[in-house]
Amino acid sequence: MKKLTVNFILNGEEIEHETLPNRTLLKMLREDFDLTGAKEGCGAGECGACTVIMDGQAVNACLVLAPEVEGSIVETIEGLSDGTHLDPLQQAFIDNAALQCGYCTPGMIMTAKALLEENPTPSYKEIKEGISGNLCRCTGYKKIVQAIQSVADQNGLDSGNRAGSGNRAGSGRD
């Protein structure tokens, strides 16, 4: 099979890369760029472990073919930290003990990042719906939702508004 060249931005860096047309974005990230944060869980877009942000949207990298990244901006979990400072979501997951084995965590954080980019102050219900495509097999979702809610609350304070009203993390059923 003939290789093709794709040009895209990966974690802020312009990339020109030769790859096979039937290769997934997930395999390209992991095998060609050694960006192993995104994981293959199911390989069918059902678990969210491979979630990355592409052109501002959370996508399952196991379902995106390499040619589809042409001209796109792709962000992985490795691109969130500047090497010395964690992204607020990464810090919130630590502060709220929102991870156990860590397998789902990168995909969960990337999904939450895309959600907060679209809606900086989502309600508790909107967060739960927003991460519904990400599965965590180790823990309940309560601490994960609390971590995301803590960043949303800070977004609301930073903008001078209180984050969404209604059911808050820890005050209702999960």
Image: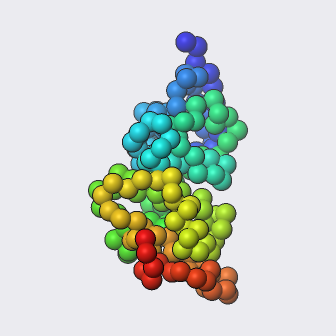
Query: Outermost residue toward the right?
Result: 71
Quarter of the image where the C terminus is located: bottom left
Q: In the image, what residue occupies the spot 59% across and 74% down?
A: 123
What colour scheme does the image use?
rainbow
Query: Outermost residue toward the top?
Result: 1
Is residue 80 at all visible to an observer of this figure? no
User: Splitting the image into 4 quarters, where does residue 41 fall?
Assistant: top left
Q: Is residue 85 left or right of residue 162?
A: left
Q: In the image, what residue occupies the spot 52% across and 26% down?
A: 23
Q: In the image, what residue occupies the spot 35% across and 51% down?
A: 103
Closer-to-camera residue (79/174): 174
Q: In the image, what residue occupies the spot 34% across and 71% down?
A: 97
Instruction: Identify whether 115 is placed above or below 10.
Output: below
Closer-to-camera residue (73/160): 160
Instruction: Identify whether 151 is placed above or below 101.
Output: below
Closer-to-camera residue (173/3): 173
Is residue 160 at all visible to an observer of this figure? yes
Residue 33 placement (x, y as % from top left) = 47, 38
Residue 109 placement (x, y as % from top left) = 48, 60
Instruction: Identify whether 19 is placed above or below 173.
Output: above
User: Splitting the image into 4 quarters, where does residue 16 fall?
Assistant: top right
Residue 57 placement (x, y as % from top left) = 63, 52
Residue 135 placement (x, y as % from top left) = 42, 53
Q: Is residue 99 left or right of residue 16?
A: left
User: Splitting the image into 4 quarters, where does residue 39 fall?
Assistant: top left
